[in-house]
Image (tube, rainbow, N blue to C red):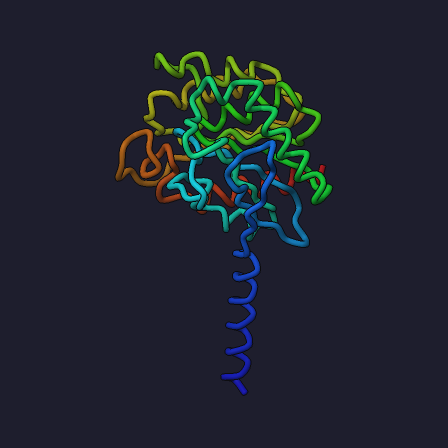
Amino acid sequence: MIKMILANAIFMVLFSFSALSDELALSFSEVSKLPIHSFEQDKAKANIVAFVGGKGLKNNQGKSKNFLVHQKHTFIAAGLNFYLFPNWSKNEKATYKLRASEDRARRILNLVKGIGKRNILPTYLVGFSRGSVDAARFSKLFADYIKGVVLASAVYTNPSRKAQHYSMERVLGSKANVSVLVAHHEKDRCHVTPFFYAKGFFDELKAPRKTLLSYKDGETSGRECGPLNHHGFEGIQVQVANDIAKWIAADSAK
């Protein structure tokens, strides 16, 4: 009897995990030539659209070393629908200029509208590193379509020739019309994502609701702007993902 109970318990855990792991490859012609890798569930609390950093997502498989992709099942297990935003094609590179463009924002809008036809849940844009430019720019142009944005290891005041015009101070400014979560490591050493300016940006920001999550723990085994460092929340990825998910769940209920 005990063996049977344990077997049933194990089956239920595996079944639940399997249900969370069912992936959809959605297709929206006005969003991308690449599939939209998505995870949906019946009792979700909110939708999140994830934007990876670097040159963006440019493969059919939805593969990336990015924090958001690594932790997608953490977000799903917390009761969120997950949609991974890709580049237009395999050949497109998501430069800062492209991410700040109205054309890219309209592609995001097409995805948000498409999600809105699938469910009526509030939608949040979660931008990591360079992906923060996507989230911030969209929130300035189309705030009415989303509930909030999460700026994780986002771009702030910096000396980079490529990135200096795309800081949150410039793209989003000092006023947001949606809820804003800033998640940042205090020891982030990436030259375009300094915590000092992240804190200053948050202090000056006016928004319906805003929250700052800062971190001190973790590991550093890779390059400063890569996933295996404080910039990518190495060693504390699950904790950060759970914190972000809890914030979204709480905010969506308001």
Q: Going by the image, does 21 lie left or right of 28?
A: left
173 is higher (above) or lower (below) than 241: above
26 is higher (above) or lower (below) than 103: below
Residue 211 appears at what percent x and percent y?
A: 57, 30
Which quarter of the rendering shows the C terminus?
top right
Q: Residue furthest bottom?
A: 1
**Total numbered labels placed on residues in the image:** 0
Q: Nearer the viewer, residue 211 or 16?
A: 16
Residue 192 appears at what percent x and percent y?
A: 37, 20
Q: Going by the image, does 125 lie left or right of 89?
A: right
At 49% from the left edge and 22% from the top edge, which residue is drawn? 99
164 is higher (above) or lower (below) than 24: above
At 60% from the left edge and 46% from the top edge, which residue is drawn? 80
Determine the image quadrant of residue 69: top left
219 is higher (above) or lower (below) than 4: above
Q: Nearer the viewer, residue 122 or 153?
A: 122
Residue 160 appears at what percent x and percent y?
A: 35, 14
Residue 126 appears at what percent x and percent y?
A: 54, 34
Q: Nearer the viewer, residue 30 or 46?
A: 30
Q: Going by the image, does 72 lie left or right of 207?
A: left
At 67% from the left edge and 32% from the top edge, which residue is drawn? 147
Which quarter of the rendering shows the N terminus?
bottom right
